[in-house]
Image: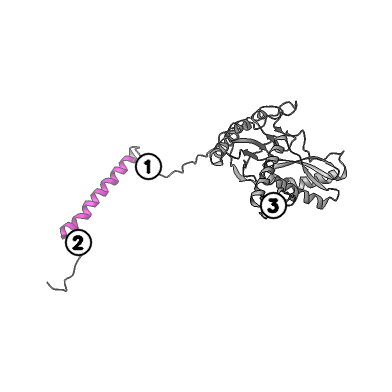
Amino acid sequence: MSSSRLYRPAASLLSATTRRAQPAICGRIYGAARQAHTSSQSLGVSALPRPTLRATPRTRTVAPQGARSIFIQIENTPNADALKFLPNHRVLPPDVSTPFIEYLNPRSTIAPPYPSPLAAQLMNIDGVTAVFYGPDFITVTKSSDANWVHIKPEIFSQITEAITDGQEIVTVGKKEGAEDGQGTADEDSLSYNENDSEVVGMIKELLETRIRPAIQEDGGDIEFRGFEDGYVSLKLRGACRTCDSSTVTLKNGIEGMLMHYIEEVKGVHQVLDQEEEIALKEFAKFEEKLRAQRGPDAAPSTPGKDSLDSVPG
C-alpha cells in the first residue's frame, strides 16, 4: 500500500445519488412542517408556546409573632463555684428599683416581694445553692461537691426555655417584707440621698463608678451598709459573696481605692450573714491547720495584705 494514500472523511464516501437525494428529502420534510404550521394558524389553532423561565418569588421566612432570638453567653467568675450567664435580654424588670435580687434557698423564690419562677426551677436543680439576678445577667452558685459538667447543661436549658417562651423572670408582688434568704433592697444603696454627708456621697460615687462595674463583671454586686468612725461597711453579693478571695478583694482592692481618694476613710468592714460567718470561721480553722502542716515558711494560700495568712499565728 502506497504511503501517499489520502484519507478522506466518511461523508465523501457517499455515492453521488445519495448526496443528491438528501436535499430533496430534507426539503420535503421542511415543506410539510411549514404547511402544517400555516394551516394551524389559519384554523385558529396556535402552536404550543415556547417554555419561558419565570422568576420564582422568594418566600420570606417570618418568625412567629412573640418569638425571641436568644444567645446566652457563659462566663467564668473568680469563684470556681459560680458561673455567670448573659442572655441578650433584660433580667430585672424596669419597675424594680433594686439593682439586684439574690435567692439563697428554694422558699425565697416564691416569696414576696420578688418571686421568680425561673429561680425556683434553677434552685430545684441538684447542686445549685444560690441564684443571683443582675440587671442583664444571672449568676448561679453551686455547692463545692457538685460538678459543672452535670448541672450546667440543665441550667442553660432552663434559662433558654424561660426567655424564648417569654416567661416573666421576676414577678413584682406586694412588698410585705423580704423572705429570709432573699437578698434585696427597697432601693439602690449607692443611689444619691439628700441626707447623706459629703463624705458618704463621695464614697457612694466612687463605689458606683469605679467599684461596682468591676464586681458586676465578676457576676456579683456590692451593697453599702454605712460609714462610721472612718470605716465603711460593705456587703458583697452574688459570686463575690462566697468567693474565697472576697477578703482580698475588699482589703487590697476596695479599701485601698477608698483610702487613696478619700482621706476620711480608715478601712473597710465586710458585713457577713450568719452562714457566711460560720463558713469564714471554718475556713480560718482550715488555714491554721494548713499553716501548721506546712510550717512558718510556707507560701500563703490567700496572698495579700490582711489576708488570713498574714495574721500572726
**Going from the N terminus, do you reach mark 2 or mark 1 first?**
2
Q: Secondary structure at mark 2?
A: helix
Question: Against 283, is 175 above or below?
Answer: above
In the rendering, at what x and y percent does residue 295 appear?
Answer: 66, 52
Toward which corner of the image does residue 51 lie, by quadrant?
top left
- The answer to if 236 sits in the magenta stretch is no
Q: CA distance from mark 2 to mark 1?
A: 39 Å
Which callout, 1 or 3, points at the residue further toward the start of the chain?
A: 1
Query: Is 18 covered by the magenta stretch?
Result: yes
Residue depicted at 64% across the width and 44% down the height: 79
Q: Tell me which amino acid carries mark 1.
A: Pro
- Indicate the position of residue 36 as horizontal and vertical percent values: 29, 43
Horizontally, is 263 left or right of 18 in the view? Answer: right
Mark 2 or mark 3: name the one nearer the start of the chain: 2
- Kindly tell me whether residue 187 is visible in this rendering: yes
Residue type at mark 2? Ala
Where, quadrant-wise, is the N terminus in this rendering?
Answer: bottom left
The answer to whether residue 219 shows anywhere in this view is no
Viewer-nearest of labels 2 and 3?
3
Q: Which residue is mark 2?
A: 10
The residue positioned 73% from the left and 51% from the top of the image is: 310
Residue 170: which disc? none
Magenta region, residue range: 13-40
The residue that disc 3 covers is 303
Number of callouts = 3
279 or 147: which is nearer to us? 279
For label 3, the SS is: loop
The foreground one among 171 and 25 is 171
Q: Which residue is mark 1?
A: 49
Few, some or many residues within 10 Å of mark 2 (<14, 14–19, 20+): few
